[in-house]
Amino acid sequence: MSSADIVPIKRALISVSDKSCIIDFAKALSEFGIEILSTGGTGELLRQSGIAVIDVSDFTGMSEFMGGRVKTLHPKIHGGILGDRRLHVAEMADREIRPIDLVVVNLYPFEQTIAKQDVPLEKAIENIDIGGPTMLRAAAKNNAWVTVIVSSTDYRLVLSELGTRGGISSRTRNLLASKAFKHTAHYDGIISNYLEDQQSAEPFPEILNLKFAKSYTMRYGENPHQRAAFYQTQTPTPSTLASARKLQGKELSFNNLADADAALDCVRAFPNTACAIVKHANPCGVAVAADTKTAYELAYQTDPLSAFGGIIAFNRKIDRDVAAAIIERQFVEVIIAPEISTAASKMFSTKPNIRILSCGELVSTIEPNLEIKQVSGGLLVQDHDSAIVQEADLEVVTRRSPTDDEMQDLLFAWKVAKYVKSNAIVLAKQQRTVGVGAGQMSRIDSARIAGLKAKDQKLTLEGSVMASDAFFPFRDAIDSAATMGVTAIIEPGGSMRDEEVIDAANTYDMAVVFTKMRHFRH
């Protein structure tokens, strides 16, 4: 790298809403002999920390006005940033414009502001930054001469090059310019979406602006020949996969994350203590119980063979007893829970390859509530399937109504069915799954598989209930359920042959309830 490639920094403008690390960074700049310009709150913070700062209003000769809306929008600022150090030297001198070599700006927290509930439009508008994006774009455009920083994560890089090279390389300036343009593009997209939402009842914007930051690159994707990376939102929502902390274990794979998310989504649906064991994004066992150990044991008993190498999720803290029960019974890839006790962590440390994730206390719903799937040439976007069916929503369509115990099991099985790939059949008894049939092209095959799973584990189906994620097109699944010992069924209804299905159920003295809601999952 030639010395001509390095651009020194003599003057910096700092104006940040995110004050993290800014004092140490500014002190380091001062030690390099760099003059610092700043505005309002940032300047005051730096002065209180003993750092020499020139106020932007003194630099421009014009004080800020309109309640701070106009501070940096001045030719002496933008001329200093945009000036070409070869072509505009004389003109800059004539106009008494001094070069600004480093622009450190992050923007008013508009996205965080509108994420809060019931934010008035006026407050949101006041958090739209104007001067900041203008400076960032100007500095990024003129990256041949100017260095721009939008994130505190890049402070160390700039200081390192100042220390080792006496300036900033063109490679780094170009990299930081790219980040600045990405930052302002995302910022404008969020504002555009917000303002459009204020004017339209349409739930989806005309232009969908998305921005995710790369968390890390994975060894490979769903298969070894596929490349993959994990991207997350700029500010990950609490109690999600992106905000979870890995306490131990090997690197998380693409499939680990996909399955862990499915498992976490499932246990989130239950207000009481629950455990879900997931394999290839399908629950192979789910249970609700008085404690986490019992919930795990019951979930595991549904299908121990499929549970091997699976993902286990809990909606409550894991203690030592649970850890011991898991290690004793099975090989597991990932365990995710709101919290892991110290004793449980110590127990898991004897199996260092198990990936242990702590996600924090679960909330019942996660915002924003969109699901996105890429297809050839576009995206499919829909609401997340967060609809909840309660007992009052159900319609009893048979002569016999469910007993109280059957009703509780029906509601449990219906919740589980939502997280099973279609066609989905779930058999349940006493708040636990006893058989799961997933992903078959015909519903009767899913029903038969669910029954076979229970038979393989010698789990009694007498008095069990069945949940189906969509209607029964024929009575064959009802006949099959009756031979298994199923006494009650929950399904959406809506088939052309509903009467045939209901008549079959009445023949077997089964209770059938309609949800009038489908839960396809692909």
Image: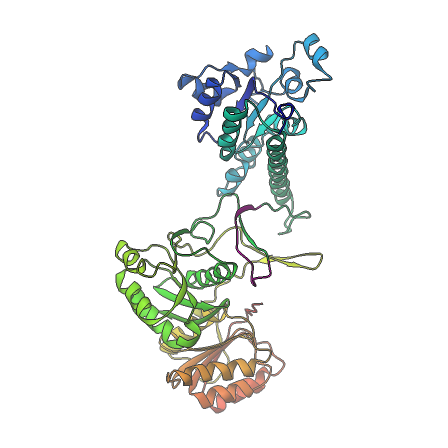
Q: Is residue 225 magenta?
A: yes
50 shown above or below 172: above
Residue at the front extreme?
Answer: 2
68 shown above or below 517: above
Which is more toward the observer, 3 or 261?
Answer: 3
Q: Is residue 121 magenta?
A: no
Q: Is residue 449 left or right of residue 432?
A: right
The dominant secondary structure in magenta is loop
Q: Is residue 452 left or right of residue 126?
A: left
Quadrant of the snapshot with the C terminus:
bottom right
Region of the chain picked out in magenta, as a range: 212-226
Which is more toward the observer, 439 or 432?
Answer: 439
192 shown above or below 463: above
| Residue depicted at 34% across the width and 59% down the height | 316
Which is more toward the observer, 393 or 477?
Answer: 477
| Residue depicted at 56% across the width and 37% down the height | 121
Percent position of residue 85, x then y: 68, 18
Quadrant of the snapshot with the N terminus:
top right
Which is more toward the observer, 238 or 204?
Answer: 238
